[in-house]
Each structure stands twice: as structure tokens, then as C-alpha cells.
Image (tube, coloured by chain):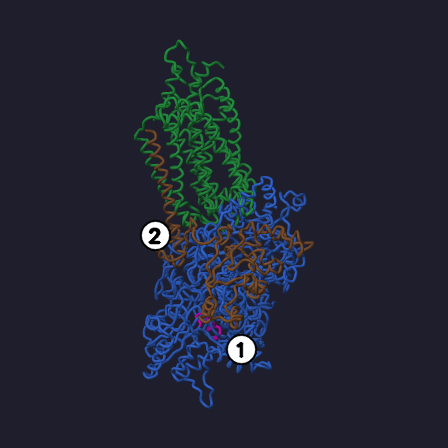
Amino acid sequence: MRSQILAALCFVALTAVGLTLGLVGAESHADESAQEETSSFDIRDVIPAGPSGNDPSKDELFPLQPYALIPSLEGQVAYGDVDRAVELEQPIAYSHKLHAGTLEIACEYCHSGARRSIHAGVPETGTCMNCHKVISTTDRPELVKLVEYYNSGEPIPWKKVHDLPDFVYFSHKRHVRGGVKCQECHGEVQDDMTVATRVNTLQMGWCLDCHRDHPKVDENYGASAELRRAELKDCLTCHK
Amino acid sequence: MSNQENNAEAQVDTDLTYGQVTKDILEPLFGFGKIYFAALALVGIGLAYGGWCIIQQLVWGLGVAGYSQPVFWGLYITTFVFWIGIGHAGTLISAVLFLFRSKWRTGVYRAAEAMTIFAVMTAALFPALHVGRMWNAYWLFPYPNQRQLWQNFKSPLMWDVFAVSTYFTVSTIFFYIGLIPDFAALRDRTRGIISKMYGSLAIGWRGTDRQWRHYMAAYGFFAAFATPLVLSVHSVVSWDFAMAQTAGWHSTLFPPYFVAGAIFSGCAMVITLMLPLSLIFKWDKYINVWHFEHLAKMCLLTGGILTYAYVMEHFIAWYSDNPYEWGIFAYRATGDYWWVFWIMVSCNCVFPLLWWFKKMRTNLWCLWIVSVFINVGMWFERFNIIASSLAHQFDPAAWTYYLPNYIEIGVLIFSFSWFFLWFLLFVKVMPSVAIAEVKELLPPPLKYKEGAAK
Amino acid sequence: MAELNRRDFLKVLGISGTASACSIDPVTPIENVLPYVVTPDQIIPGIATWFATQCNGCEAGCGVMAKNREGRIINIQGNPEHPTNKGSICAKGVSDLQASYSPDRFDGPMVGGKAASWDDALEATASAVKAAQVAGKKIVWLGRKRTGATAAMTDEIIGAMGGTVLRWEPLGTEALRAAAKAVFGIDEAPHYALDQAHTVVSFGADFLNSWGNPSHARGFAEARDPSLCGFVTQFWTIEGRLSNTGVNCDVHLSPVPGTEAGLALATAKLLADKKGYTGRAASLIAGIDAEALIGAAGVRMERIVELVDRLAHNDSVVMPSGTTTIHEEAVNIATLILNEVAGNIGNSVVFGPTANDTGINTFAEVAAVLGDAANIGVLFLDELDIAYTMPASIGRAALGQIGQVVAFSSEPTGSIGAQSIVLPSGTGLESWGDNEAISGRHTLQQPSMKPLKDIRCSSDSLLGLAGLLGLGAATDETPGLPADFATYLQGWWNDNVFEKTDAPDFAKFWRNAVQTGGHFFDVTPTGAAVQMTRLPDAGAPADGTTLALFPHPFLYDGRHANRTWAQEVPEPVSGLVWGTWAELSPATVSNLGLEEGDNVTLTTDAGSIDVGFFASPAVRDDVVAVVMGNGHEGAGRYADLTGANPVNLLSEMQYAGASVQVTRAGKNETLSSQIGNIDQDDRPITYLVKAKDVGTGSGPGSIVHLHHPPIDERLTQAGLLDMYPEPEHPTYRFALAIDNNRCNGCGACEAACYAENNIATVGPEQARRGRHMGWIRLSRYWEGSGEEPDVRFQPTMCQQCSHAPCEGVCPVLATYHNLDGLNAMIYNRCVGTRYCANNCPYSARRFNYHSYDWPEPFHMMLNPDVLTRTMGVMEKCTFCVQRIREVKDTYRDVGQTVPDEALLTLPACASACPAEAITFGNAKDPNSTVSKIFQDERAYAMLSELNTKPGVRYLARISHSEVEDGQGGGH
């Protein structure tokens, strides 16, 4: 008898919880699919935002964004656990090993922003063509693709391998000018990367490990290295 | 003092036998009435509506609530403090009064303690519910993380985290220890799987002398351990406000004032809960006017302290000649929130005065109604402190007026439903009166006397 | 440091392994990174490119710098090279950036309400023109003020079509020009130089704000700055209400509407008698009965005597009337005569470097043409919304009858009907153009980004049209019209600008002009001699309650109504956002029994509208002032959203004078005030110092503390005030100095802040709920009343306290004090307990109650250096930390600390401020400008008694009033 009552009580409690999780689940699913292709499901149909607006008529004027309560589990981990960093299928099977390794082209020849800007920059198609105008492209499918892209005037849709979250301010300029080698973060692309892959977590802790005691700091700042290290641990240095 | 006097004082009818006691108190655990199911249904509705409001908030953000800058805290923190306050009476009655050996606690302390734990469980919902990004609320706990970040131990909110969790842990343990002998009794009264469950909870209690000796030692120890928490927890909670710079919060008066208020509301809540309970379960032998009268006296004392605190607050604010301080207190009494202020004063300072008359504090109706008023009043006290101070911050150019909207009310309802859900659960699975301790008050059963329990 | 403790702690526990185990992986969908195919030169991804161009926010023709990041203009700042605004920019100019990203823009040409190709659209237009020519109907061009090559080409082509060109500005200087013509025989609105005037008298002109010339604001600020000129100008305003300019006055005289002209003449008369003036105007004012006129105006004689005395002994300038003045022309004539008598003509009131109004028509001329609209075959509308800005009897009536309307506009307006042909002209950021809005100041507009839509600037469309009509073809004597406007522009500049210079080579001259934003000649100011022989009728006083329309400081004549920034930056005087309101006197409010949030119905013989209200302590009981700018129809989603159009109350084009009935109506659904209280409730929030005390003080804040004793220094020395030591600032302590005495409450800082920091606009409903997100609160305290209103502005942003109350209470260290003295706010660490905001005595923090999204294409305008905050996160000002980061980075390359001059106007608010009231710098360096200002005798920290040690200091406003400043007292 008592157990029946217990069941009854748990039922009441669980309806509330279940209601929550159910809607939440549905909502996050909708949100996730919305990221890829358009989804028929709209959280606004299920949960109107109550008194403070999101009356659908006003949506397009002052849209509110619902929160994705459960992050989608698809896609690649743009930063975080390295084991989950997969080799991405790039539009053109470009080999760093060949260009940077065998041919010993300097990184900054293509990634020309690295010393000047916060972005290292993915090279314009024109840069590739500087050489591939003269290097035979016939009967080499990857290069054929390249030429097609170049002539079509469409940008090559490279996939991001190192994708820092939006709240991070990262300046290639500072790191390169500080004497940090590209490989320290991007791995030995010239030796063992036919396709570039992420070899570091790119997580805050990983950044801090260098910001705390990178030998270059002492080299560059000498007497004021202590101060510089303190600056490097200031949250505002990397967070927008 | 002699056993006889004790019993006389304890108002327990000495003709009772151990067997009778056990039977009476365990009676409600077997079989159910309509009232119970009605209550259950109410709770269910409350949870459903409140749950819907909470989802709103999760998906669309706190904006669905009635907040208006610069009022960044409102009903949620009010209710958090309210429930923490409710909790206090339980520990006070069970631990402090135990140490003082006051007999009248016996009848009520078990339920009061249960109330404590459930109140804390309810209060604990709110810090999570009120933060902007509750999915990140776990950042408030110091755990090793890849960010290599640490919390800010200067922040009163961090102190809260520790104060409340400690309080919850200790009172739960204390509660459980008190229950051990009664679990044993239940074990012996039940059969099958359920019996095994209680058996495991009773951790092999046989009631031997050695066990009793150790038991009493442990119980006394935890009583002593819990006692300081009665003072500490609500002091820490009060620091959420007292440590802030906001006029009307920034006051050294707060800790004692909050503790007194907590006990005040807690005792009132015990009356509100136990009075119907004792009537429904016909426990007048164990919980009766005599107990409630003591609780009422407790309220009179703490209520007096509270009233004094109110007066002092306003006096000091006026005397300080600080425009912000006095601005706030004048505003509370006469400004947009006058109604909150006067509900608070009448419920906390005026109505309880009835209890100065014995006639009144022994009249069940008067007891119950006034106790409910006190609960209402204490909720509005917290609302008064939080809303009015924030609505009139230092810079008049930023003033505003805040009222909770239906979402917040929904969450308030959720909290009450949540609390009563656990309480209803409790009365059906655990004895709401401490069997063992009631027995202590009875004359020991003698071999030749009839009707002695085993 | 916290992390270090943590590390040791981890070492001790030896669970560093757990650390990584507990790390939570954010899972993100794979993003693409799209490189250029061929990178345009001068573009480096991640580095901003600046283009000098012109501002189209109003007709002042300021020069601006457009900031281009990755191909999109994300911000607009003043062009320091430009003589008109000298690097400052107003709220209108900033908001105009949104024009390019408006979600309501036309995607391309439209014919009869349907999308069409450019060829079809131009064909349709051409045939309409031909038809009109055949039918002998008029071809009319009606547009905004245009000058320079843009105007020249329009005139040429429309002329060739046999059409007439009309240009008209709803808030133009028509009345002033007419007055100048009448008095001096010069058809020019004079230029007023305020910077040397000991006394400024205004008869209602809103010259600091909507009068569209930032030089006034700067001049006025300089005249008020004792450190510059050794005196503080005294500002008298004589009007029936207080405009956004008027609230800065020392003395407010409120004459009976319609008697201003008489009052000015009476003053002139008294002044002439006092000075023994015998100039050419003497005969004009000889027969004036001063007492009678002053009596009629209902102004105290003593005040006028005092004023006359000041005018007699000091340099002065008398400003003309404003839109809220009845008989504007008569008043302006009177003010010019008063200036003449005061000896200002040729000194502070000059001709020459003035608004270049050649080819600008009077409304009478425009109305005459629109009058017989039936005979108009084709009407070219150049961005002018005649349906909104003109009385319905003229504007709408005409539109009904016109054969074919051809609209050059990038957004819909009320004047564009279903049958109109729309030739989207794009915005100033997308096309070539120029202006000479002020004589001699040739400003260039260059395309600074790729057009978002399929547009052609109106000039190019005209060229196309000319081609179709076979106009301007090359003949042997004329070279004919070029293929595109860019070429025409260069040609025109070659003939009209380059020729006047002594530059050797046009190519070099042109490149230089494009780089500096134009070419600016110094026109020598000249005086003028009075030509007038007899005074015109001064006009009769109004009877009953009169209506007075005034321009919204940001929406202006309504052209910015579709800009959410202009809508959501609170109107400085009333603090109201989103809607139209009437200024009513407190007496009127109580008579009607109005409560906050009520509507009133205004009724004139022309029509009636429902608007909200603002109980202004300064408006006369018999005046109802209504703000223009809102209440559009078919002019875009934000413009249509709120308010009512007060122009519908006018039967003829007179902004003031119509008699109006006010009655109580229902509740207002959109309007909400962002200013909590009318005054500072006797609290010491903002201070006032007496003009007589200025210069007598020694040490920081000394004269402020004459009335408000500071914290006892002995306590500080005894260490009784500080529980924690002062935080370390090894290199920088960034700080802001705000001169309340220079600040005139124009709101430019607020708008600039919105643009720079991706601040969400939340809309009327959220604003009413108190979720307004602006980081700067332009606090307005209305302390005085009657003749001495004593209105004080105090821009309040995060004060970057050294002992910040917010920092201690954040449980997760999302906000903390950094090495540069900034009160850092790390958005993605914030869990949103909001304790910090509760504990901020300045109420400077804002909370994201929702994730406010940006409707496309607004998102293209976002500043990539600033995170867009999402739901549940606290946000606030950090002195534009992204700009600080950038400038520090630049100087780190050369191993230097950032010098003072690189910091002065670094934050968006400081760079925008037209009054140059905001100064930024490094307080750690004792020689920096801020450090010096911090030492000023007027310097004080807001709520200093809380000992928060803010990084912001204010310079107290200077008052000429003799009334003791009782506010707050010293607690």
C-alpha cells in the first residue's frame, strides 16, 4: 500500500521534471537542426516568451534568441579534447607536408597576416596561383579543382580547423612578433600533416600554461618580465 | 527534578503504555484519507504550473520575469531568504532545546526538523533559479577545472554556498540519528521488503544499553554541533545584504535581526504545520495546546526583538543624517512600497501581540491564523528589504519601481508545492513524532504491570 | 594571485589529472573560412581601413571617417581635418550608419510596386518624362539640400529636361535668411561665433543641437570654459519652453508667445539708450516704447535691465528664434537689430563662412509648385518625405494628383506610393558625392564599402536617364555628359575647386582631397550694414493655448525615425524613448488629472493626434510643445512602430502658433522614460560651483567643497577609510574626465557607445520594463525652477573604481580590477547573479534579460572586436577596452607606452563629443591631460563619500545664479 503511495508521489514529482526535460530536449533538438538546415520546429510555437515580448508579430523587429539548453553532440570539437579533433574533409586535399615541409615555403608566404594582424589569414586563391600558374595543373585533379575555383571567382570553402570561440581575442601578430613558433600551437605541420589537424586543446588552461611561464617572456622583456607575465594572466588580455 | 514532575510538566498522560504510543504514532503511516489525496492533487497542480514558468525562464531568459533595472534581485531572493529562515526553528527546537532539556520540544521536534530539511531543500532551488545562466551555476562550486580558475571567496554568495550546504548536511545527519530507534520500531511493525528497507535504515538497532549509551552520546554531540549553525547560517545569509553598499542593506544590525526573524517565522511555520497535523492524526496526547503555547511564547520573544530591530533601523537611518540611508527608510514607509511595509509591520509587530493574552495563545484558531499572518509578514519583510532598496539606489536618475509578474508568482507557487510534496511524503514514511523520546517521558514498564509493551 | 594559490592547491592534492578530466568540451558546428579570391589592396583581414567621407545625417555636411573592417563599415567617427566638426560627430551622424544596414532597404529598383531591372526602371522613368514633355506638363525635382557637383549635375540634367529644381529643408534657415535679407540685404543666414561671447542670448534657437552645426556646440563649450578664455559665458534664453539647448541656460525668461520680437526690440532700444548708440539702426528703434513691450511680454523689467547692462559691457551674441517661436521672421529681424545695437555684427555675427543656401528654396516657392500638382507630370523626390514633413493639405494633397512620382531613396517613405518608380539611391557609404554645405568647405563623399543592395546613386541614375532621353550628348562645343558621376565629380572639382587653389597637379590634388575628405577654403568673415528703413510689423501675441513643434534631437525632422539607435537613446531633457510626446506644464498636467503613462489628445483645426506627455517644469501654461520625428506611415518597421506625426496638426507650414486643445486620452503603449526622477532629491550626486568662486580655489575640488565638505583627510591618512590597499597600477591607470560645464546634453556619447560596443536595442516594450541597455546614462537633474532652471547633465557610465563595490561580490571573479585600472568584465565567465549590479552605487551595469538578436542585415554592422552578449550576462562600459587593446598593441610594436595624445579621445564617447567635454588618459602619468584635469578646483568624484576611488572625475558645472546651491549638503 505504502509503495503505491510512493509511486503516486514520485509520479507527481516526475511529471514536473519530465515536462521540463521533454520540452527542453525538443527545444535543443530544434535549435541544433536549425544550425544545419531549416527546421519545421520552432520553439516559439511551444513556448511563447511570456509577458516581456516575443509576441510573434514583433519577432522580426526585436528578435529574442531562445537558449539551446543541450548543446548538439554532432560536429567536431573545435576546441577541447584533442582526441575528438577529427581530420576534416577539405575541399582541396592541400598538403602542408609538401608545401611547408618538402618545398620549404615559409609559413608567412601564404599566411601573410600573421605578423601584421590578429588573423594569420588563409591565403587568397591568387596566392596559390602565383606558383600554380606555372606548375602544370592538367591531370592532377586537386589542382584542376583549384583552377576551377580560381576561374569561377568563388572562394574556396576551407573548413576551420582551429576555431576559437567568439569571446576570445587572439592576436597572431603579438605571438609571432613575440617569437612564438607557429608549430608551438599548430603542431609540426611541415612534417606530419597532409591535412592540417588540431593538436592542442586550445582551451584556457592550455593557453595559461604558456602565458604563465613561456621562456620568450623573459627573453623579450628582461627586467619587466614579471610585469609582463602578470599582464599575460589578466583576463582582459584574451577575453573580449 | 523527579520523574513525576517531569511528566507533569511534559503534559503526557502517564496512563499511556509504550505499545499504545507506538501504535498511535505509527497509525497514520498505514492507510490514507481523502484530505491526503486532495493535498497531493494541489501539490501536483502547483508543480506543473511552476514547472512551466521555470521552462519559460530557462528558454527565454530572466526577462520573462518582472525585473526592472536597477532592481536586479526580486521575488526569488526574497523567497530564498524566507525558506532559509523557516528552516531555523527546526534546528533550534531539536538541537538547542534538547541541550536545554526543555521537555516541550519532544512532541514537535521531529516534524520541525523535517520541516527544516525540506525548507533548506526548497531554498536551495532559488540561487539556481535566479541566476541569469543557471546552466553555468555549477561554476559557483570550487572544483578543479581546465580553466584553472578559482572562486572569489570575498563574495558573500560564496559564503552562502558553504553555509547552506553545511547546514543541510548537518541537519540531515542529526535528523537521521534521531530517527534510528523509530526506524527500528517501524522495522518491527512491517513485513517483507518494506521491513527490510527500514531495517537497513535502523542499522541494526536493538535498543540495548550499550547502543543507547552510544546513541545518546552521538545525539548530544550533533545537537551541540548543530547549535551554532542556528546562528551562523542566517547571519551569513544576512551578509548577502549587510556586506553590500546599498543603502538599507548596509547595516551591522542585520545578522541578529535576521536570526531573530528566522526563528520567529520558523516557530510560526511549525504551528501552521503541526496544528492541523495533530488534529488530523488525533495526536492531542502528544502534541497539544501546551506545545503550541510554548512556540507562541518563542514567537513573542523573537517578534519583540524584530520589532525593536525595525525601530532601530529607522531611528539610526534618521539619526545618521545620511541622505541615502534616510531616503530609503522614508521611502519604504511612505513611497511606492508603502503597502509592503505596512503589511510587514502589521503582520510581524501588531497581530502577534494578541498572544500576550493567554486566552488567545491557547485558542487553536487564534494560534493558527496569527501564525499564518506571521509567515506572510516575514515574506514581505524580505521583499521590503530587497525591492525597495534597489528601486531607490543612490542615483535618483536611475530610480524605478518593480513588481513581480505571473512568472515569478508561478515559481513561488512551485517552491511551496515542492516543500509540501516532501512534507506529505514524510508523514507517510516516517513517524512525525519521536516515538522513543515520548516513551522516555513515560514511567518505565514494570514486569508485573499489565499492558507493558515488549 | 588567485591562480597561483589554486595551482599549489592542485599540486598538494596531486589531482591535476582530474583537472583535465573535469574539462567540459564545447561542441561547435564546423565553420567555413572563406579567403578572398584576389585580396583588394589596402585590405588586411583583422585591420580596419578608414575612409574619409561626408556625413548625410543632416544638412550640415560634416566630414566623417568610416571604419571598414573586412569590407563592412562598422563605425563612423568625425573627421579631425574637417573645419565644421573638427573630429566630433553628433548622435544623428552616428545613427545614420544604420541607414546602410536597414532591414527595410529596397533590394533594387521598383516600378509600380514590383521589382524591376535598372533598364526597365529607367525606361519607365524616361517614358514618363517624355509623356510629360509631350503633354506639356511640368517636370519637377524636389529634394533635400544639395550643393557642390551633386547639385550642379541635377540642375544641368533637370534643366535640360525643361524641368524645375526645388530644394527645401524642413528645418532649414529660411526665416533667418529672410530676416538677414530684410535687415542687411544679404540673402544668407549669418554665422554666429560663440566662443568669445561673455553673454549669449537666445530667442529660442536650438543651436547646440538640432541646428545642425557642431561648431556652435564647440564654441559654446569654449565660451563656458574658464581655463580657455578666463570667463564663463552667461546664457540667457528667451522662449516659452526650454529646448535641449535652452536647458543649459543661466537665466530663462518666458515671454507671452508672439511678443518675443517686441521684447528684443525693447531690449535693443534700452541698450541703444544706455550706450548712446547712433548707428544705422537707431532710426528703426527710435519710436519704440520699451516699457509697454516688456509689459506685454510679461517679463520682469529688472531682468531686462540686467540683460541690457550685460550687453552694454561685454562681448555678446544674440541667437535667433527657433521652430517653437511664433512670427519667426519678425523675431529674427529684431535679434539682428539687437545684435547691431550691441555691436556684434562683424564680430560675433558674421557673413561669409555661412551655410551655403544657394539654390535652397523657401517653402512658399515649394508650396506654389505643389499647389498645382495636377500640372506636374513627373516629380523627382530626392529623399524628401513630403507626405510626412509637410501639412497634409499640401504634401499628401499634391501626391494624390501628380502624374508620376520618381523617388530616389534607399528606404520606403510615406511619399512613395504603389505607383511610384523607385530608383534606390543607396547611402553615403556606397556611392560618390560631395557637398559645400558651408561656403568654401568642399566635402567629398567616397564609396567606402560595397553596396549591400542593387543601387545607383541618384546622380548616376540621372545620367542614365539623360542618356535615354538623349540629353547632354557630346556636341562640338560641349564635351557632353560623362558616363558616370565619378568622372563628372572630378571634372566639376577640377573646374570649381582645383582652379581656385594653387595646387600644381590635379591628380595629386584629387588624391589629397579624397584622403583628407575634401578641400576647405578659409572664407573671410565680413560684417554688414543695415539696409532696413522701417520695421515690419512685430506680429500680434497669441491668444489661448498655442502649439509649438520642436525637432527631436536624434530623429531630427523624422528622417532618422527608422534608426533604432536614434529611437532608443533617451531624449536628453525628458529621458523618453520610442514615441511622440507633448511638453505640458505641471499646472496643465494637474488640471487634466494626468498620471504617468497617460496619453493626451491634441486637437487643432487641422486635425488631432494622441501623444504621451512630459511634465516640463519650464514650459508655459499656455504653450503645448510637441516633439517631431515619430509617427510615420510606410517609412520602415521602426519608424512606423510608435508615436504620431504632429505635423498633421498644422494647416500651414508654421511650426508654432496654431491654437490647440488638450484633453486626456487613454494609456500610452510605447513611450517610456529612462530617467527615474526629475531632480536629485537633495542628494549630493552632481555639484554646482559659483562663477564668482572660479579661480579662487587651490587643490582638487577645492571650490566644489566650499559647499560640500570632502571626506576628512585625516581619516584617509590614519588608514581608517580603506580596508584593502590601493590596487597596483604598474603602467597605466586609465581614467576619464568629464566637464559637466562643457556638456550640453546632446547625447552624442550615448549613440557613439551603442555603435562601438554592439549594444542591443531592445524596443519599446522591453524599454518600458526597464531593460534599456545603453551603457551611458545621461542623468538629467532639474534642480531649479522659474527664471533659473538650473538643469544639470551628468553622463554616468561605469566609473572603473579602484575600490569597486561590484568586484568584491562577484562569486566567480567575472569582474575584477585589472592592472590598467579597468574594472574588467569578462562576459563569458558571468553566471548572472547580478549581485555586482545591486552593489553598484552608480547603477552603471546593464543585464541581458534576453538574447537580443539583430535582424538582418544589422548583424553585418557589429564590431568584430566586441563580443555580442547573450542572455543572462551582465555588461557595462570598460572605456572601450578593445580600442585600448589596439592602441597598446600598436605602441608595443615599438616598445613604448601609449603617449597622452594617442589616448585623449580614445573611447567612442570621447571621440564623438561635440563639446569636447570628455577627456581620456592615463592618470598614472602625472603629466597627462587627465591627471591635470583631476587637479582642477572643480574636479569631484561622483559619490566620493563612498570611497570607491573612481577612475572618472567630473568638473562641476558653473552657475551664475546667486541662489545658494543647497543640493545635498555635505554628508
Q: Which chain is blue?
A: C
| Residue C173 is a magenta residue | yes
Residue mark closest to the camera, 2 vs 1: 2
Q: Which chain is green?
A: B
Residue situated furthest bottom in the rendering? C476
Secondary element at tag 2: helix
Q: Nearer the viewer, residue A104 or A127?
A: A104
Name the spot of residue A239 as percent of width and height, x first.
54, 54
Residue situated furthest top in the rendering? B448
Q: Which chain is brown?
A: A
Q: Which residue is mark 1?
A: C530
Q: State how far apart marks 2 and 1 are (Cα).
A: 73 Å
Crowd rating for badge 2 (residues with CA inside 10 Å; few <14, some 14–19, many 20+): few
Name the spot of residue C896 as percent of width and height, x first.
66, 60
**Is C377 positioned to the left or the right of C228 in the image?**
left
Task: State the extent of the magenta-drawn residues as a range.
Answer: C169-178
Tell me, yes or no, whether the two marked residues, 2 and 1, touch with CB atoms within 8 Å.
no
Q: Which residue is mark 2?
A: A45
**Is B352 positioned to the left or the right of C418 in the image?**
right
| Residue A159 is a magenta residue | no
